[in-house]
Image (cartoon, rainbow, N blue to C red):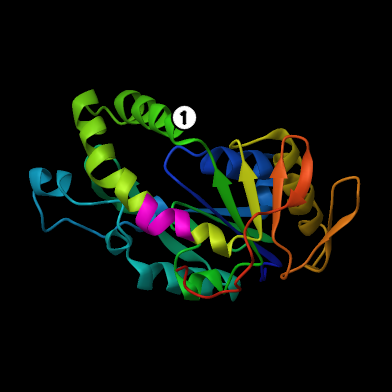
Amino acid sequence: MTIPSFVIGIAGGTGAGKTTVAREITEESEDSVTRIPMDNYYKDLSHMDFEERKDVNYDHPSAFEWDLLREHMDALLSGQPIEMPQYDFTEHNRKDETKTVEPTDVVVLEGIFALYDEDVSGMLDLQVYVETDADVRILRRIERDVVERERDLEGVIDQYLSTVKPMHEQFVEPTKKRADLIIPEGANAVAVNLLEEKVRAETYTDSASAWTLGEEGVEHDEDDHLAVTSTGVGDSEFENDGRKEPE
């Protein structure tokens, strides 16, 4: 039975580059990493018809089934497999099938609210916030939703202005205060390399102890609050307020 030794939470606004960061830091250690996309934990809305589901605010914390996510995270950290829901963005609902997920050395939780819930946040050894300019994020959102999720442009823009943007400002961005590590400019190479190094190390050891960042040997511990830019590691402008609910 594998008991995960390191758990990473990667949060940030829509289109910030969370999935890219999660993919790039784990691709070389894929067999030893479990990735949990929070999108799979949107509530089951089978009781609604398609038109009703289209109008749901999916950028509000209440859109997620938090009890199930907590239960599954707790099971994985206890060395137990889970049956993870699968989400269909074209139908705005869960698929009928689930995916069996086995616990591994490293668990990566990725989603806009990965740092939002106090209980889930308490399970994370490293809390990461990916920060990207809002103009870049909306362009990525449009490209993704129109091309990959077969949605019309007008609907995507309307959704962004009516729910995505205000929900980001009210609920997502404040979770940045919880982050141990803030990654500006999306998936910049310095940050990805540092995190990839940590993930690789955890797949060979059972220790989630002190971590040295960068050439200057900056030590990471739970009291540090760091920002990784394309030129290196620096102190964040934010103070670490522990595991409390973001204000």
Answer above or below: position of 55 versus 118.
Answer: above
Question: Residue 239's quadrant in the figure?
Answer: bottom right
Above or below, 2 relative to 235: below
Please state the horizontal and vertical placement of residue 136, each as a whole percent of the image.
Answer: 46, 29
Q: What stretch is highlighted in magenta?
A: 169-174
Q: Position of residue 111 (x, y in %)?
A: 46, 52
Residue 85 seen anywhere in this rendered image of the structure: no
Q: In screen coordinates, is 81 left or right of 146?
A: right
**Camera-nearest residue between 120 and 233:** 233
Q: Where is residue 224 in the image (x, y as percent from the top left)?
A: 74, 65
Q: Residue at x 47, y 73 (%)?
A: 245
**Split into 4 quadrants, where in the image is the C terminus?**
bottom left
Compared with 97, 25 (above or below) is above
Check if residue 170 falls in the magenta segment.
yes
Q: Look at the numbered disc 1 and give the secondary structure of its residue.
A: helix
Q: Which residue is the site of mark 1? A: 136
Judge whether residue 236 is colored magenta.
no
x and y, in percent, of residue 198 in the image: 77, 53
Residue found farthest to the front: 237
- At 72% from the left and 48% from the top, the residue drawn is 195
User: Which amino acid type corresponds to the residue marked 1 in the rendered image?
Assistant: Val
Q: Nearer the viewer, residue 93 or 63?
A: 63
**Badge 1 density bin: few <14, some 14–19, many ≥20, Cα 10 Å:** few
Magenta: main secondary structure equals: helix
- For the question of whether residue 126 can be seen, the reply is yes
